[in-house]
Amino acid sequence: MKSVIGKNITLSLYGESHGTAIGAVVDGLPAGIKVNTDFMQQQLDKRKPKGKISTQRREADDFVITSGVFGGFSTGTPIHIMIENKNQKSSDYQPKLPRPSHADYAAHIKYGGFEDYRGGGHFSGRLTAPIVAAGAIATDILRNKGITIGTHIKKCQHLTDREFNNFAEDIEICNSKYFATLDDTVGEDMQQHIENIGAECDSVGGILETCVLGLPAGVGEPYFNSIESVLSHWLFSIGGVKGIEFGLGFGFADCLGSKANDAFAVCDGKVVTKTNNNGGINGGISNGMPVIFRVAVKPTPSIFKEQDTVNLAAMENAKLTLTGRHDPAIFHRARVVVDSMTALALLDLLVQRYGERWLCG
Amino acid sequence: MKSVIGKNITLSLYGESHGTAIGAVVDGLPAGIKVNTDFMQQQLDKRKPKGKISTQRREADDFVITSGVFGGFSTGTPIHIMIENKNQKSSDYQPKLPRPSHADYAAHIKYGGFEDYRGGGHFSGRLTAPIVAAGAIATDILRNKGITIGTHIKKCQHLTDREFNNFAEDIEICNSKYFATLDDTVGEDMQQHIENIGAECDSVGGILETCVLGLPAGVGEPYFNSIESVLSHWLFSIGGVKGIEFGLGFGFADCLGSKANDAFAVCDGKVVTKTNNNGGINGGISNGMPVIFRVAVKPTPSIFKEQDTVNLAAMENAKLTLTGRHDPAIFHRARVVVDSMTALALLDLLVQRYGERWLCG
Amino acid sequence: MKSVIGKNITLSLYGESHGTAIGAVVDGLPAGIKVNTDFMQQQLDKRKPKGKISTQRREADDFVITSGVFGGFSTGTPIHIMIENKNQKSSDYQPKLPRPSHADYAAHIKYGGFEDYRGGGHFSGRLTAPIVAAGAIATDILRNKGITIGTHIKKCQHLTDREFNNFAEDIEICNSKYFATLDDTVGEDMQQHIENIGAECDSVGGILETCVLGLPAGVGEPYFNSIESVLSHWLFSIGGVKGIEFGLGFGFADCLGSKANDAFAVCDGKVVTKTNNNGGINGGISNGMPVIFRVAVKPTPSIFKEQDTVNLAAMENAKLTLTGRHDPAIFHRARVVVDSMTALALLDLLVQRYGERWLCG
Amino acid sequence: MKSVIGKNITLSLYGESHGTAIGAVVDGLPAGIKVNTDFMQQQLDKRKPKGKISTQRREADDFVITSGVFGGFSTGTPIHIMIENKNQKSSDYQPKLPRPSHADYAAHIKYGGFEDYRGGGHFSGRLTAPIVAAGAIATDILRNKGITIGTHIKKCQHLTDREFNNFAEDIEICNSKYFATLDDTVGEDMQQHIENIGAECDSVGGILETCVLGLPAGVGEPYFNSIESVLSHWLFSIGGVKGIEFGLGFGFADCLGSKANDAFAVCDGKVVTKTNNNGGINGGISNGMPVIFRVAVKPTPSIFKEQDTVNLAAMENAKLTLTGRHDPAIFHRARVVVDSMTALALLDLLVQRYGERWLCG
């Protein structure tokens, strides 16, 4: 259960940045789902580097489905999605000088020098591509059940996007954009900021905020499979994610209970909460309100400024100046990965409650 | 895998606040470990309510071990720890009026009215007691391997504890106290603050910060069992935890890569990092530096102020004024739960790497 | 996942033969199930030793449910069932002389001498008691869905019971008896045979045959969670079980395909098979026919004849003559354990397909 | 956990008989293992159809490794093995007439008609090819640790191979042959028998017997991960396997305890058993003796004789006469699949005990 995640829906992942191919096997999806390869490609396009705010490594990300789909529909058996690597430049990597804040050193110790160090190997962000392809199918299934997911870039240094307002509309706005801010001007400012930072050979981090709309109350499994537990398990797998908070999150530490508590009310014959400080989750279970969470993404460790490191062969201090192609920021590309993992994780919890047959109903 | 967690080390949990007993079964611990029941009781004492900053429900928390220990040593088979409930007052609970921000309503939908609503039932913080008892054994095992864990109360509203300084000493300071701040004065101020807030029929949240010292480099399993993924899965199971961040966490969003990156250096023949913004984890794997994370705990939802809720039987708005015994804050009691779960989660990852036999060596 | 089994339904087991208590935590059962403690006790009574064909250790097997049941109904959270040990006689055991064909020696190596050797410790057949109690709840749930399970003693040396005939009636016959043969005369002969063998200080093995009626077609998960895989995983956990076969089982090796194949036919508008050599399972999935399997149970290793063994302390050959109380046969008592595990295992597969909500519908 | 198996070592499987490719992802193998692709191919060759005793569908089974191997050594991250399908003839399949004793009908109900029915789809024996490739790596790792595995064809109708005699030599004999009998003459007779049966448009079943030599005592995890439980879970996943027995297996039902018990003795300073009726396993744990088990494989369901079936579209009785290419027996080809799964399953148990680092030592 290292490269595999999920209980009823499982995702198995393989590949390295500069190997011949990367891929994922997703199982547990119901039979009879129309597999929308156009949507899968659209989601992959949101993950692709574009313009000056992303790496210049440009992969087509053409995926092939070798199994689990027959005549355009899911068969109910494992779906294997594979993406060939075509645009590797391994000469850019120096195995003996671990890049600061990358997995290089920790992997070197763990794998005893046998790790594929080229381009970060198994730890490369490229492995999120097949997750996005798999997640697109999950997203489609959820949408058919009235459950939608949207993520916007909440913050990048001093620049902050507006809050979610009308959830349904805002989710559509998020999903229609490559650089997903709710406020267009903020989005342009952020992109310019990233570009400037990239020009200075540096990188920058950010915060993503996600909303899940339409999740029925009663999903999530105490004690150990709370929605928070399951989502964070998936999301902390994404390289660069270093924090997750639900609802007010760390803001709860500034609050009194009288302010933080979400009072219940009856509205149109339904129970709602007047505020949503708990992000739609009480006791680990959905309460029917929108699920809201935020994910902190660190600056890309790969920067072009000279850095201090060590020469592992000689065990002495060394200087490292990276060449090659790197992203000055990755949070805008990580957005669709967050969406994809969220869709897969929630699907897994939904199967436990409703059964695999419900999903295709 | 709802009430069970772990792969090589498993924890299985049961019980309700006002049932006859709560307990945990912990399996996968090696044979031949001296089971220190005194230390188990000491750890339980850190979780116990004390003074005016905690609920007036006072349980002895006398645990019994019914299996898995023979002649004072672990047998290698499941250890069952049980704690009887003795001081219940179920009359304080009104099933049809869900308490805001508690699990009551979500559980009601999930379980269709069959949930044991008394005192929060399965969702009660009382269930963390057997986790603490089990965690004490794990903590002992890790300590024998040179791995120590300490958690302090970092923040409560405007009051902030000092930073970790000398890790080894600070961990001892944390573990020697009931109210775990590194700075005594801040600790007294916080306790007074909690007491004042309790007197106002309100409650308050806080942030805990944990340090793990001595974890060898190379622990943690990409892609999906990163240290962050595994720890957050465990920790988000604790009721009231709404955020987790590692290293700089959400602070990464304010940073440039050139500042955030942790440069490597050789020090006394060992590879270290000059800073530790990544909290000892790169690519989901330990890098040998102290593991640092923070957990946000929300204010206790149970407050004595009148609150808005709904009458689920009549499906109409209602007012709720709680009586009974409640904590004005829980983060100080949650501290040892965080320590316990951290110990169990890390032990699980260590078995994969070193085998169960290593643990008793 | 050593002392825990199951995916959507999990069973966690603890205890030793001569410890203070044994027990099980069963989770994943839906809320709102009337928990029939009388039926649980009836099932436990089928496992109890009786007459001269069983050990003279007579335990009341009074179980307590400490959690997961409220007002007589399941709450949807973990059900903990505990049985105290009251009639231990530990003086009968000599730790340094491992009993042939028992777990004693293997456990000694595995646990390095820290195992609880008294009465077989964790390996004792006593641990099946809480499984039977948990299985009784599962059996009840299945019965409400039209799925019934029955097991008879197919064979004991030269004595063979008649074949299943009318499944529904035969399952009732099995479940109405303590010594479950379909043919009364064979049953009496077998009991006399066991008694005779016991009188000669020896023990004897047997074969159990189980029928599951009413399992809908489409249950079971290829590739690795075939019904055969899942059932055998559960059933081989029972001490003394050394073989499992489905349908014709080992008899398939004597067959041609033209004879072994189960031809399909339409009968009353339903697809059936004319024969049922595959035991109701094709490709690991139920086909709607009765599920039929057989389990081989070895003779109780504890016999009163002198046996050769080794003295582990001195590492030299030794003689062992057991005293104490032992069963001359266990297959008749294992019968209800097979039923219980079958019920739990099938329930787990049914949740994946239909969801936990289906079970209470 | 449907198409994924294993805890510390995981195997994830995908593909359909007539899809573009089949494959497996194996994870948890240690880094630094020399990956012997020649041996992988040799093992695949043992699974390949040959001569008149197997199907005329002849696939090259050229595998590619797209990840997890770098410079000829395992990297410690997931190894993906893929085999393209090249020799499909889908026109031979008629979707609406389920083949007796095949998965066709059960899958049709389970997947609602969306299953890929061509050539058995996901249920095809072809999916065992990537398992064999993955198993070859596991076999190599075990061999380096002194653990060897061999399987011979014990029985095919009236023809019976000789018993294991000198285990080390016999394992070599098994592994050196395509048609693995210990006695050459019996092997030739069996092959002629299969050929004759194929000529009569029929098929035949058989029994395989496996020996594992060198497994240290103390491996296997009670209660639910006994060696028997774990091996049977893996092995019953193989299509056509309908029975498994360990040691005397079903023969225990004919035995008295005094004969069945394996007496201990000290031999050359080591504890051994004088007989090995328990097949090297006591209480689910290895006792250091050879592990012995037998697997029953049913006759290939695909025969060329006319058979009764149903037309699922019209829901009426129908006749089916298969054309195309089918095996008159599969047990000789299943042999290496049994070896492969056994190697992977035991490796998984060994990691729990010794850790992943032990494996590469």
Image (cartoon, coloured by chain):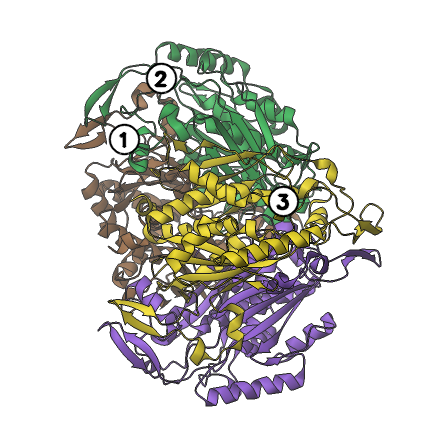
Chain colours: A brown, B green, C yellow, D purple
Q: Residue at x 49, y 83 (%)?
A: D54
- Can residue A27 be seen in the rendering of this structure? no
- Place residue B91 in its image quadrant: top left
Is the residue marked by circle 3 packed among few (<14), some (14-19), or many (20+) residues within 10 Å?
A: many
Q: Mark 1: give few (<14), some (14-19) or many (20+) Cα within 10 Å.
A: many
For mark 2, what is the residue? B91
Q: Position of residue C311 (x, y in %)?
A: 82, 48
Give amino acid for label 3: Ser
Query: Could you tell me if residue B346 is visible in this image?
Result: yes
**Residue situated furthest left in the rendering:** A268
Q: Is residue D81 above or below residue C235?
A: below
- Which residue is the site of mark 1? A276
Q: CA distance from mark 2 to mark 3?
A: 43 Å
- Residue drawn at point x = 35 percent, y = 17 percent: B92
Mark 1 and mark 3 residues within 8 Å of each other at the beta carbon: no
On the rendered structure, is D90 left or right of D224? left
Residue D226, percent across and down?
59, 53
Q: Are marks 2 and 1 in contact (CB under 8 Å)?
A: no
Q: Is residue C24 above or below residue D81?
A: above
